[in-house]
Amino acid sequence: MNLKHYGLPLTAVLIWSANAVVSKLAAGVIAPSAISFYRWLLAGLLMASVLLKPVWHQRRAILPYLPKLFVLGLLGMVMYQCLAYIAAETTTATNMGILASLMPLLAVGLSVLLLGEVPTVGGIAGGVLSLLGLGYLLSHGNPASLLAHGVTTGDGLMLLACLSYAAYGVLLKRWALPLNNWHSLFVQIWCANLVLFVYYLTQSAPPITTGGLPLVLFAGIPASVIAPFLWMHGVAQLGPSRTTTLMNLLPVFTVAIAMLFLGETLHAYHVIGGSITLLGVVLAQKLKQPLRRRVALA
């Protein structure tokens, strides 16, 4: 496999990692409803310059799948992004990046529930290991305090955001819509924009601030248009499995960027809890033996 094919999807992961830091920078600078709405409005308008005509020509093929595209837009662009922006107000970018690494594992669990897939050895072992690592991380190295006080609001919201995006990935796989990937994404974005516009109005239509404008531009162009293009190219060249593995680098990149640009401190509980959590995710991805078969042999 030519190593040059890894460059584009790695760049996409780097952009998405930086976007987690942008989410933290947005806290207190621009309202979550404003950055969510303007981000996807900008992305939708940019994509419309290229995709509007071909999507319009394919409207008869797309129309039957519109309800499913609406659900995907709701999960991936509305719930995930809005929850992440709200979470950033009360948690760190470092925590957000580490929690985001759980999405592949959450997808494995949802696949068992929604797709009827057989649980795997890696899925069970990795799930238990990741829960232990997550507990250590969220309790700042003191699991007893987690039992006494629970998780912070920001960390809890980020977990819900990750669950939403994991559901997005699972439904995308389950439905396997026979549509061009870009056409599907374009329609999802405009479905999301309808909901985001209502959400924006219910929050009294907060304006884009001077400090918030560059954050909207980054979220709307590199994170929403350029990164998906690079990622899809990577999937085409490397295949889904190899490309998805690169997402394990997202917490590493996010922590590094947060330390450089936000001055966040990397504590021992971040390293220990994050490493255990990531190890669990890797086990879930690598150990594919069906648990049922192993139990039968026993």
Image (cartoon, grey):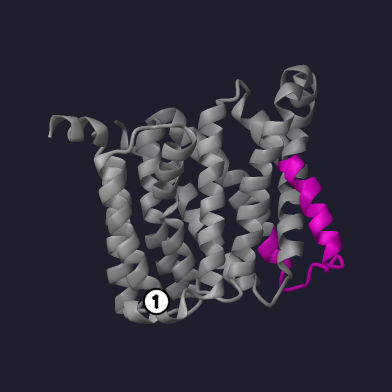
Residue 234: name its quadrant. top left
| Count of numbered tags | 1
Which corner quadrant holds the N terminus?
Answer: top left
| Other-residue count near label 1 (Cα within 10 Å), few / some / many at <14 / 14–19 / ≥20 | few
Tell me if 243 is positioned left or right of 290 in this view.
right
Q: Position of residue 139 (x, y in %)?
A: 38, 77
What is the quadrant of residue 183 in the picture?
A: top right
Where is mark 1, residue-wise?
147
Q: Position of residue 235 (x, y in %)?
A: 45, 33
Question: Residue drawn 37% across and 46% down?
Answer: 246
> Magenta segment: does it hold 24?
no
Q: Which quadrant of the figure contains the C terminus? A: top left
In this picture, is 203 found above or below 126? below
Q: Secondary structure at mark 1?
A: helix
In the figure, 274 relative to 190: above or below? below
Q: Horizontal placement of 177 versus 42: left or right? A: left
For the stretch drawn in magenta, what is the main secondary structure?
A: helix
Q: Is residue 217 visible?
A: yes
Residue 207, horizontal then vertical, whole percent: 83, 68
Range of residues picked out in magenta = 189-216
- 218 or 284, nearer to the observer: 284
- The quadrant in which residue 97 appears is bottom left
- Please give the name of the residue rendered at 75% of the width and 41% of the height, measured from the top-left corner: 191
**Magenta stretch containing residue 192, yes or no?**
yes
Q: Residue at x 77, y 73 (%)?
A: 210
Q: Position of residue 98 (x, y in %)?
A: 41, 63
Amino acid type shown at disc 1 = Leu
Q: Tell me: 184 left or right of 105.
A: right
Q: Is residue 157 above or below residue 115?
A: below
Instruction: Please indicate, yes or no, whether residue 186 appears anywhere in the rendered image.
Output: no
Residue lying farthest left? Answer: 298
| Residue shown at 60% from the left, 72% from the top | 25
